[in-house]
Amino acid sequence: MEESLKDSAAASPKRLRGALMANASILVVYAAGLMFMPLVYHALSDKEFSAVLTFAALLNFCGFTFLALHQQAWHGSTISVSLSSNALDVYLAGLIAKLSSTLWLGGYLPIDRTGDFLYQTADLFSLALVWHLRQHAPKLEGAPDARTVIICAIMLAVWVHPSMNNHLFFDIAWMTGLYLETAALMPQIFLDARPKVSSHGVLALLCSKALAGFFWYHGFEDVAPDFGINYPGWGILASYAIQLLLLVDLSLYCICGTDANPPSESAPAALV
């Protein structure tokens, strides 16, 4: 009995070191985020409320970073550990559509200094990560073609869009990007094809959309037209509400779903 307790106590530090090594990349992302976020708030944001939108973009980048790390750890496995290429194509188109507006005009940017470069930079890095994820992502059978989804999003954005840029093309482009982000996960959820992606990544994306939705909730009246019902405001809030519901569903599956065994010792099970 005493010998077994001693062996267990001796093995505990080894298990701890092993867990830390297995999760080194995740810990680095968390450490970098914890150091960078206060720096952004105190040195770059002017402590304006609009910095919430920048933090949402940074969390979005962190979320895709976690998904990329998880995909890399399980590369070559037959287990679905990545969002489908269908979803990533739609995410890719959505980021491009939003960046086509935010890189040139400031209507949908934070009004503090983070809107000068940091917000767009976070979206550009997210775009690069989505492109990377797309290279090794599985295709989802039965999902609508990305071109069909893009056309539907454009048509909806033409009908319902804000006018923060005072430029029809770029206002529609930004709203198209938001609708595409909303539609990206729908086929994955509705076809019951949820992948066992990184729970860290999904939770980061969930926090990102929660912060962005919170910002636009406070900006609801700012996007209202001069007369009539505020359809643009409701369109924005509905989009973020749907994204939150889809991400909550996916996060519950990632956290509470059946854990898959790693394909090899080199692919740590801790990267969930």
Image: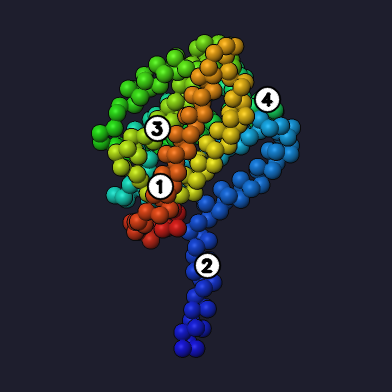
Q: Disc number at residue 197?
A: 1
User: Of the residues under marks 1 and 4, which one precedes in the sequence?
Assistant: 4
The residue furthest front is 228
Eyeballing the image, is 259 above or below 14?
Answer: above
Q: Are marks 3 and 2 in contact (CB under 8 Å)?
A: no
From the viewer's perspective, tell me whether residue 83 is left or right of residue 231: left
Eyeballing the image, is 187 above or below 252?
Answer: above
3 vs 2, front mark: 3
**195 or 182: which is nearer to us?**
182
User: Of the residues under marks 2 and 4, which one precedes in the sequence?
Assistant: 2
Q: Secondary structure at mark 2?
A: helix
Which amino acid, mark 2? Leu
Which amino acid, mark 1? Val
Q: Secondary structure at mark 4?
A: loop
Q: Which residue in the protein does label 4 denote?
A: 111
Q: Residues within 10 Å of mark 2 (few under 14, many from 20)?
A: few
- Find residue 217 and report its image quarter: top right
